[in-house]
Amino acid sequence: MSVRILALVGSLRAGSHNRQLAEAAVKLAPEGAEVELFEGLAEIPFYNEDLDVEGDVPAAAAKLRAAAGSADAFLLFSPEYNGTIPAVLKNAIDWLSRPFGAGAFGGKPVVVVGTAYGQFGGVWAQDEARKAVGIAGGTVLEDVKLSVAGSVVRFAETHPVDDAEVAGQLAEVLNRLHAHVEAPAAA
């Protein structure tokens, strides 16, 4: 059985370093795991309970929920916007938190990583994302973290997959997430 890890990227920018980090995760997935980079967060309307009607959920939100429902784990990539989580990532978490008590995170393991221009690599935003996804029902692996500082300079001419230090750290994050999913199956 292959472990399916759904990656959500909190930046919509084509040249996003967080997107590049997610692309690196796809390539660095350990044997027995597959990282699926979800496309389409920009098309999902802001969460509104009036839109969240069974049988009539907006197509983009339904697509996200379907992808999340078939995932075994989640890997969220969060840049830091004004010291906090980007709206597009928070919106995805909100859609996946519903229906109340039966959201797609449903106790599945979640890791939040990311990169940002600042000296701390976006840790405030990543902490906010961990908080939100934990409240939404995910099992946040609090001890599995990766915050890459100075993204604009560090990745100016190098893709994260070609940065040996970052690739090694990201591979370790993926191995730990994969192991967490596999551990209950082995018990």
Image (cartoon, grey):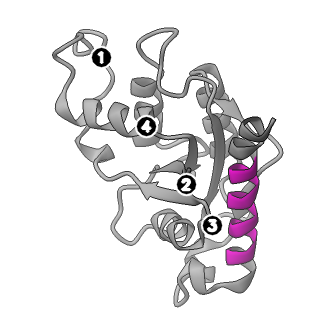
**Image vertical order of residue 78 relative to residue 28, above or below:** above
Q: Position of residue 105 (x, y in %)?
A: 54, 28
Q: The residue tagged with tag 4: helix, strand or loop? A: loop
Q: In this view, does 101 lie to the left or right of 166?
A: left
Earlier residue among tags 4 and 3: 3
Q: Which residue corresponds to mark 2?
A: 79
Q: Which of marks 4 and 1 is in front?
A: 4
Binning the other alpha carbons within 10 Å of mark 4 as few (below 14), some (14 to 19) or many (20 upward) gives few
Kindly report the distance in space between the C-alpha atoms of the residues bearing marks 4 and 3. 19 Å
Residue marked by disc 1: 48
> Amino acid under label 3?
Glu
Residue position marked by numbered label 4 in the rendering: 70
The total of numbered circles placed on residues is 4
**Main SS of the magenta segment?**
helix
Task: Identify residue type, mark 4.
Answer: Ser
Q: Give the range drawn in magenta.
A: 167-179
* Mark earlier in primary sequence (1, 2): 1
For the residues labelled 2 and 3, the Cα–Cα distance comes to 28 Å
Residue where numbered disc 3 is placed: 31
Q: At label 1, which amino acid type do we have?
A: Asn
